[in-house]
Image: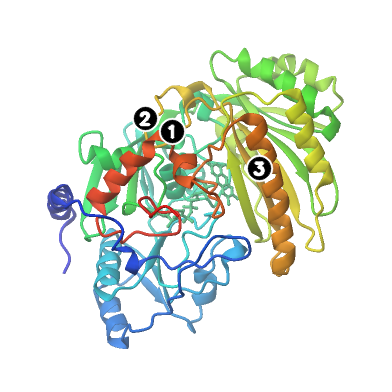
Amino acid sequence: METSRREVLRTGAAVAVAGSVIGLGGGWGAAAAVRTPAGAAAARPPFAGEGVEPAAWRELRRRLSPAAGLYRPGSAEYGARATPDNQRYAFVRPTGVLACATESDVVTAVRWCAEHGVPFAPRSGGHNYAGYSTTSGLVIGLRALKDVVPQGHRLSLGGGATNSDVYKARAANLYFPGGRCPEVGVAGLTLGGGLGFNDRKWGLTCDRLTETRVVLADGTLVRASDNENADLFWACRGGAGGNFGINTGFVFDAVPVARLRATVFDLTFALDAGVQVMEDLRHILDADRDNDFDVRIGFKHAGDGTTSLWVLGQRLGDENALRRLFTPLLQLRPTRAFMEERGFWHAQDYLMEPLGAKEAYASKSLVPDQWPTPDTVAAVAEWTRGWQPGPGRATGYITLFAMGGDSAAHRPDETAYPHRRATFVIDIGTHWKPGVPPGEVRALLERTRAAHHMLCRRLSTRAAYVNFPDPDLRDWQHAYYGANYDRLVAVKRRYDPAGLFHYQQAIGRPRV
Ligand SMILES: Cc1cc2nc3c(=O)[nH]c(=O)nc-3n(C[C@H](O)[C@H](O)[C@H](O)COP(=O)(O)OP(=O)(O)OC[C@H]3O[C@@H](n4cnc5c(N)ncnc54)[C@H](O)[C@@H]3O)c2cc1C
């Protein structure tokens, strides 16, 4: 039975607020049963749809909108739809993949899973590092809900829109800070924070969110904003996807960019230049009073054995101004030095990550509030130099995302994303081609673990970015959320008291 959206919103809000507060320990039975491979933490037993009668599947099909797709093992499109972006988790085979076509489909799916005890995982872009949007139960896919619609100075998005949907739409020349990978979902990005080349200027993606619609565990659809379900809204800005409900829509406060120009830069150096490059960039960032400058710095050892230090980013404004700023950097003899002034959208096109063949990947992150010393930068370069690609020709990298500026304009408790004093978000990772044997994967992960350990010690932090989730991380509650964790547990108890939304690092999961 389907209800009109307005009615659902009204009743949903009432039900959600009335949600009782009970312990979270007992309800993990209908969990997203994700098993984790080499090097990852403890797993739940697999679920392969046992006990779900064919009649129940037929009933689900009947309750869905005509445009929705339901794919079971054996059907033609199942393979492509079941597999997440991260090939490390391609072995997890869902009992079904639902391509929702409407918000009502999402409501139907959540209710059906609850009624039949089927674990589920929402999926938008499917780019979760730790495979948390895959499950041996039902994948609830939102990709078809991807409209990008201007509303005055705001942009309204469906819950399955990706970065590329926003860039392609260029709706009314309105923009909000997004991420770099075209296929990453705005849902996952926003719910965990959202870093991009414009966060120093206009804040994190989650900072521009003004409203979101959420299907809760009891199957109701509610609106969350500063004025409605404000605690849920707070949690949706950094508390990570898959914890409180399924977000079917987002509204962002946008910036008009039609007249803006940006100069993109893409420089490559030898690793030996690392200390001086970092020093020069520090001066540029320190002097960047208007937060026009944003940069990522990558130390990389590619699978083919080549090493490089890349510096990629943009400065809002003209090319001459950037060239003046970069005079000391250019004296360091980069092997590549591309700089070009472009219209705003054209600049974002340049910064988008090129799509390649799908690979397996794993990442660890660190979020320091201090600048790395020259010794630390030299140690990062040394680790990169010593990376062994192994028979799988795996890439090893350490990437630093510059923070500060407007991303630091909030108190750590103002949104669930807590790392407001960060100098950088650091991504320590590896990617490899599918098919590398588990022993070799363990060796790759051990190498990233060593770099993480070294940087934890040198930067005196264990803080981590929840959108680079690491299944091996101990005390992830504190690392991802800092002092905000207890408040997130309270929100979880209120909106999902039985713990229906669940995965290995879900909010409220008992500490081990
Ligand atoms: C190649 C690559 C590049 C990246 N670049 C950046 C970057 O530039 N900046 C940055 O900040 N991060 C970046 N990330 C990390 C990225 O932000 C996270 O992986 C993000 O969670 C992905 O969102 P998604 O919707 O694609 O993922 P999904 O895997 O679909 O979902 C992520 C989590 O949210 C849940 N979820 C999905 N949809 C919904 C929904 N509609 N409602 C509620 N929960 C939902 C899932 O169950 C899962 O737990 C990158 C990741 C990759 C793999």
Question: Distance of mark 3 from mark 2, alpha carbons?
Answer: 26 Å
Cβ(mark 1) to ligand 1 < 8 Å?
no
Q: Return the mark for residue 418.
A: 1
> Residue 342 at x, y = what percent?
63, 29
**Residue at mark 3:** 452
**Residue at mark 2:** 413
> Residue 269 at x, y = what percent?
82, 32
Badge 1: how crowded within 10 Å, few (<14), some, or many (20+)?
many
Point out the tag, 3 or 1, that comes first from the N-terminus: 1
Q: Are marks 3 and 1 in contact (CB under 8 Å)?
A: no
Q: Nearer the viewer, residue 379 or 283?
A: 379
Amino acid type, callout 1: Pro
> Residue 105 at x, y = what percent?
29, 65
Q: Are marks 2 and 1 in contact (CB under 8 Å)?
A: yes
Q: Return the mark for residue 206.
A: none
Q: Quadrant of residue 102?
A: bottom left
SS for callout 1: loop
Tell me what residue is drawn at x 76 percent, y 56 percent. Answer: 394
Q: Is residue 136 above or below residue 195?
A: below
Badge 2: how crowded within 10 Å, few (<14), some, or many (20+)?
some
Asked whether residue 338 is in view, the answer is: no
**In the drawing, does residue 289 fall left or right of residue 397?**
left
SS for callout 2: loop
Asked whether residue 119 is in view, the answer is: yes
Amino acid type, callout 3: His
**Foreground mark, 3 or 2?**
3
**In the drawing, does residue 193 fall left or right of residue 493?**
right
Question: Distance of mark 3 from mark 1, alpha carbons?
Answer: 20 Å
